[in-house]
Amino acid sequence: MNLLRIGNLIDLSFVEVITLNLLIEYGKPIVRYTLYVIVNELIQSNKIDLEKLKPSDLQNYELKFLQYTQKKEQTNSALSTSSFYNNLTNLEKRGLIKFNRNYKGKVKTIEPTPLTSQLLKYLLQFLMNSSVIPDFIQFDEGLTEKIKIISNKEHLENIMAVWFSDVIQLRLINLFKTLANEVFILSKKDNYEHYSKTDLMDVKTSEIHKKRIREANDVFEMIAVPNYRKNANNWDMNRIEVLKELHRILRHDGIIILVTKADFPFTEDAAADILLKNYKESILDTIFDKKELREDLEKAGFIKNKIIEYQSCVIGFGWAQ
């Protein structure tokens, strides 16, 4: 079975997501019209107090949004039954809800399928990972200062950034440009044609062929892995095999930096713990403790390893010699 991607759900409407959530919450088959009434009431009742926003304090684009929402508020935004029933038909075709029909073939009640809760969980994890955004600029600046102190290097001749994830963080590419004369990137991507030429200006790309990085031995002054993870399986190599290759291309006085997530405790609040549990499951592959990170570096041949905690991250520093 193919892995589920967020793109597979791109046409799922907000009304449909609300409907699925209410079906899970209700816990048993529900009459179709009753479900329509509940969804409609929920849509009408959950409002943000726009009066608390002071137009004089808003920029032009914010004023446009305020005017848009106020106009919508003046119109009837209630769902029609035909539109809602059409949404239900779409969900049934996707296998996300089940129609229970009477002897005449008419829909009597509706209930979720076993897929429903898993889908909502997946969407929640995606939204949590993409919307809980810390101040990355401040984080990057603080971590950069830590790296300079620990590595005792103010500016580098070259640096390679290695991505274990599917997404390349262009903001870090631009940061690396300020730290080194030459920036290389290594990722699973076959090409970079669709990326901005400005972002990748003067950036060189590397690749792995038959489990070997294209670059020669003892080339790089620093290698950074911003999203180191346990089940990498990049380039048909496990994470230790990749680390060993990175060790090979690192200079004798070079340093590698692995950035991972730190584990975190749960609370005694049931609702908060559900959110934390979902978030933890979504990043579980990137959670390391100090011992695990140190062992990885040692297995790959790095010495003088130093592990620190920094703003909910565990960061490993390893020297080639």
Image (tube, helix red, strand yellow):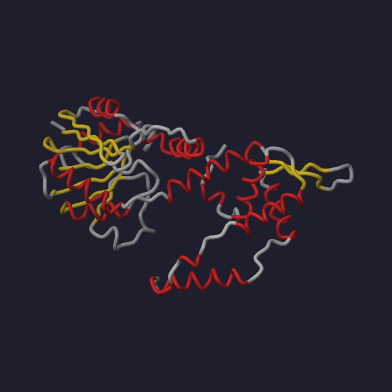
Query: Residue 43 occupies which quadrant of the picture?
Result: bottom right
Q: Nearer the viewer, residue 32 or 83?
A: 32
Image side of residue 5 versus residue 262, left or right: right
Task: Establish if 287 lies above or below 73.
Answer: above
Q: Nearer the viewer, residue 47 or 298?
A: 47
Image side of residue 145 versus residue 45, left or right: left
The image position of residue 6, as x and y in percent, is: 51, 48
The image position of residue 10, as x and y in percent, is: 55, 53
The image position of residue 15, as x and y in percent, is: 63, 55
- What residue lies at 17% left-to-right and 47% top-to-bottom? 145
The image position of residue 210, as x and y in percent, is: 33, 36
Label total for image:
0
Query: Residue 288 occupies which quadrant of the picture?
Result: top left
Task: Establish if 133 lies above or below 262.
Answer: below
Query: Residue 252 occupies which quadrant of the picture?
Result: top left
Residue extending farthest to the right is 104
Q: Nearer the viewer, residue 271 or 219?
A: 271
Q: Nearer the viewer, residue 52 or 70?
A: 52
- What residue lies at 48% left-to-right and 46% top-to-bottom? 126
Residue extending farthest to the front is 52
- The quarter in which the N terminus is drawn is top right
- The quarter in which the C terminus is drawn is top left
